[in-house]
């Protein structure tokens, strides 16, 4: 029996099981909520992998679920012409540590990013977050607004998680006992990555082989699959609706960028964010999927550069 046949059989079994999913995902219910994370705790020694390019006011880029700082590859150099562009890999992703613990929630990630900001003495900071990283960016911004309000200058959210929502099928699969580990460990890494990118991209023809290879290599690193599965189970905090009440207190200028065709985090989430963030502006894009910075960075850059330039020049953000 050939390896290809076995792989194909497992894939068909996983797809069949996935199609029969009806609330089988098991989200971690014991993950500490926001109340447990509010107080500063600098006892965690875990250091996130990071890189920096350019000079000027710092722009911190926070990637989404299953990705890494690689997802920003197209926009780093253009932004670095005027800013110090800093990319980080969240805990469990890219080159960052992947400890076999149970602390992979949005709040835990936000605490680590906040510590990174404070340890590197980042001031006049612009934070850009995508998808899961957008949720992290929101939590970091709320941390900073209460403890170090002078540090952050603006916030950019791209197709960001923010409120309770129906989870995408691939998250449900990863969070389902037996099926999640089976799919993650049995299917070839490149096949998993390609399947995910096909959900992320609007036009599958634009998915580069280099991206498949890079993310597959990341997925093959020691304990990367453990981190992926644990993050999936903790991706939606049980107290998210209560946490969202904090958004109204974020008065820094915010740019919200969304794809009309996003199948992972629907546009209604972006519209709701725009209503609740007091100093925000919403830009809606068409013909692109969940990750505009990867699929069509030329669509994103003008909006991003214009917004950042306005904040750097101390111009007010246009009202809605």
Image: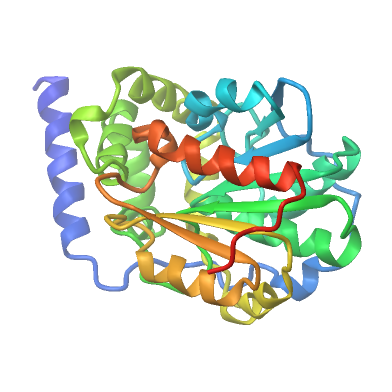
Which residue appears at 58% of the width and 20% of the height?
A: 77
Q: Is residue 91 left or right of residue 157?
A: right
Question: Of residues 62 and 45, which is closer to you in this image?
Answer: 62
Question: Of residues 251 and 94, which is closer to you in this image?
Answer: 251
Q: Is residue 242 above or below residue 52?
A: below
Q: Position of residue 272 (x, y in %)?
A: 48, 74
Q: Position of residue 283 (x, y in %)?
A: 44, 56
Question: Of residues 64 and 156, which is closer to you in this image?
Answer: 156
Which residue appears at 52% of the width and 60% of the height?
A: 235
Question: Of residues 237 and 282, which is closer to you in this image?
Answer: 282
Asked where in the image residue 240 lies, by quadrant, the reply is bottom right
Could you tell me if residue 2 is visible in this image? yes
Which residue appears at 73% of the width and 34% of the height?
A: 48
Q: Quadrant of the N terminus?
A: top left
Q: Is residue 25 left or right of residue 122?
A: left
Which residue appears at 29% of the width and 19% of the height?
A: 209
Q: Position of residue 208 (x, y in %)?
A: 30, 22
Q: Is residue 183 above or below residue 315?
A: above
């Amino acid at each position: 029996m050939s390896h290809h046949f076995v792989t194909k059989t497992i894939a068909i079994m996983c797809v069949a099981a996935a199609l029969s999913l009806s609330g089988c995902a098991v989200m971690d219910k014991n993950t500490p909520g926001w109340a447990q994370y509010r107080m500063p705790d600098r006892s965690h020694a875990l250091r996130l992998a990071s890189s920096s390019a350019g000079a000027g006011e710092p722009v911190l880029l926070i990637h989404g679920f299953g990705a890494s700082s690689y997802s920003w590859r197209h926009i780093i150099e253009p932004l670095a012409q005027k800013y110090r562009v800093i990319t980080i890999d969240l805990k469990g992703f890219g080159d960052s540590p992947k400890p076999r613990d149970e602390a992979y929630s949005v709040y835990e990630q936000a605490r680590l990013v906040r510590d990174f900001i404070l340890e590197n003495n980042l001031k006049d900071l612009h934070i850009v977050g995508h998808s899961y990283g957008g949720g992290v960016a929101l939590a970091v911004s709320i941390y900073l607004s209460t403890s170090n309000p002078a540090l952050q200058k603006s916030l950019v959210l791209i197709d960001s998680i923010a409120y309770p929502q129906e989870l995408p099928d691939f998250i449900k699969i990863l969070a389902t006992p037996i099926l999640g580990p089976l799919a993650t460990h049995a299917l070839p890494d490149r096949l998993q990555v390609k399947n995910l990118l096909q959900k992320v991209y609007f036009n599958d023809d634009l998915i580069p082989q280099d991206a498949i290879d890079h993310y597959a290599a990341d997925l093959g690193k020691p304990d990367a699959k453990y981190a992926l599965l644990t993050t999936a189970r903790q991706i939606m905090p049980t107290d998210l609706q209560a946490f969202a009440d904090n958004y109204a207190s974020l008065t820094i200028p915010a740019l919200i960028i969304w794809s009309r065709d996003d199948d992972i985090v629907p546009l209604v989430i972006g519209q709701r964010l725009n209503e609740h963030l007091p100093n925000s502006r919403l830009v809606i894009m068409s013909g692109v999927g969940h990750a505009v910075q990867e699929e069509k960075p030329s669509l994103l850059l003008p909006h991003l550069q214009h917004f950042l330039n306005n904040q750097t020049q101390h111009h007010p953000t246009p009202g809605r």
